Image (cartoon, helix red, strand yellow):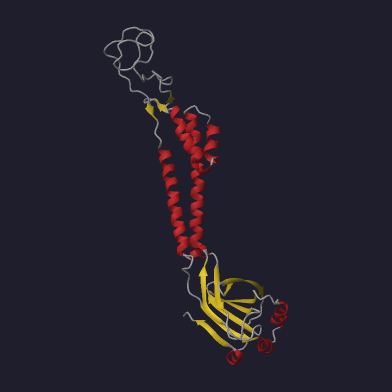
């Protein structure tokens, strides 16, 4: 699997997981608030729409005032103060035999009717606090999201420059001889449209594909380019997750006449990279024009007039 595909899948999984968390939070808050007698719709909206899970955290703090208890016999939702389940009549708490008011263990008198209580009271199971398994799952997913994001960032950084090497070459070609030899009207027309801005670059781009290999040719014209340019580095690097690739060409000033030289940059790899030029430590604006005509000329012409100033051959 390519870096791009793996990164895309990982991004999709994180987004899907984040969306699932908010859906789970909405369902959980609505059901839980309904059981506790709270405003279910209002709290669901607050929990889902408030940023950074603030609404959900506030709900978890507030809901403590609305306990969720169930009858140990029939499982129906009941209030904590109930002495008898209104659904199945199960005894939930000890009660006064005179007025049926709930009493606590150890009481000698009823707090409502002031009548003495028997020393031995009928046993009661008591309300059961409802289980909260969904909350633990939601919290687990909330913890997993930052972990997955960290993995995602690590993957992004690791693929920023970790890309398969490409075969790359840079050759100088004289302008007049190139036009005479290739007789390429598109190249001649393109050169006529190139400006004379000293800080600009112009590139004619041709791409071809053979099997799983893509070859891109950049015919580069720079008004400040001399006859023997000094290329300090050439390299292909990947963007985040390998989504984009850039062919970086770094040059510095050198002696000689300017404006009479072309650079033919050829790169072969899995994908065609974009061209990025740096001259004397500063990036240059490069205007790229596409063409359907190969740009290299004949092999004899390149051997006679071209000067290979950089080559990296990958088998």
Q: Residue furthest left?
A: 119
Residue at 69% in and 89% down = 180
Point 57% across, 84% down: residue = 171
Asked if residue 216 can be seen in this view, the reply is: yes
Residue toward you, 74 or 58 = 58
Dividing the picture into quadrants, the one containing residue 65 is top left
User: From the viewer's perspective, is 189 left or right of 302?
Assistant: right
User: Looking at the image, is 250 positioned above or below residue 175?
Assistant: above
**Where is 79 relative to 275, above or below?**
above
Q: Seen in the image, is 94 located left or right of residue 68?
A: left
**Residue 234 horizontal side relative to residue 262, left or right:** left
Task: Return the x and y of residue 260 as percentages of the image width and height.
Answer: 66, 85
Q: Position of residue 297 (x, y in %)?
A: 63, 86
User: Whole-percent x and y of residue 262?
Assistant: 63, 83
Q: Is residue 71 above or below residue 247?
A: above
Residue at point 43%, 23% (across, down): 79
Q: Quadrant of residue 185?
A: bottom right
Tally of numbered tags: 0
Q: Nearer the viewer, residue 290 or 61?
A: 61
Residue 274, visible in the rendered structure: no
State the residue in front, 309 or 258: 258
State the image coordinates of residue 20 (x, y, percent, origin top left). Answer: 50, 46
User: Eyeballing the image, is 147 above or below 110?
Assistant: below
């Amino acid at each position: 699997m390519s870096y791009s595909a793996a990164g895309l899948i990982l991004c999709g999984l994180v987004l899907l997981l984040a969306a699932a968390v908010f859906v789970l939070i909405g369902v959980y808050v609505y059901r839980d608030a309904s059981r506790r007698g709270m405003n279910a719709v209002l709290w669901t909206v607050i929990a889902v729409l408030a940023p950074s899970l603030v609404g959900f955290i506030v709900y978890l703090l507030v809901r403590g005032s609305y306990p969720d208890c169930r009858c140990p016999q029939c499982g129906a939702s009941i209030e904590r103060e109930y002495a008898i389940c209104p659904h199945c009549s199960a005894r939930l708490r000890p009660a006064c035999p005179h007025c049926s008011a709930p009493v606590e263990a150890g009481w000698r008198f009823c707090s409502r009717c002031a009548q003495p209580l028997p020393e031995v009271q009928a046993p009661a199971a008591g309300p059961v606090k409802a289980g909260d398994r969904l909350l633990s799952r939601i919290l687990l997913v909330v913890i997993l999201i930052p972990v997955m994001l960290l993995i995602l960032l690590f993957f992004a950084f690791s693929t920023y420059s970790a890309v398969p090497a490409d075969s790359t070459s840079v050759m100088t070609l004289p302008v007049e001889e190139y036009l005479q030899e290739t007789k390429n009207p598109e190249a001649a027309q393109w050169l006529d449209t190139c400006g004379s801005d000293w800080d600009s670059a112009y590139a004619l781009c041709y791409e071809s594909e053979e099997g799983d290999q893509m070859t891109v040719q950049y015919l580069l014209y720079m008004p400040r380019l001399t006859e023997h340019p000094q290329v300090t580095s050439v390299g292909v690097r990947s963007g985040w997750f390998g989504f984009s690739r850039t062919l970086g060409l770094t040059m510095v000033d050198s002696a000689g006449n300017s404006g009479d030289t072309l650079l033919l940059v050829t790169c072969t790899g899995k994908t065609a990279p974009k061209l990025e030029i740096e001259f004397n430590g500063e990036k240059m604006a490069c205007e790229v024009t596409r063409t359907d005509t190969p740009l290299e000329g004949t092999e004899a012409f390149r051997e006679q007039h071209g000067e290979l100033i950089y080559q990296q051959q990958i088998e």
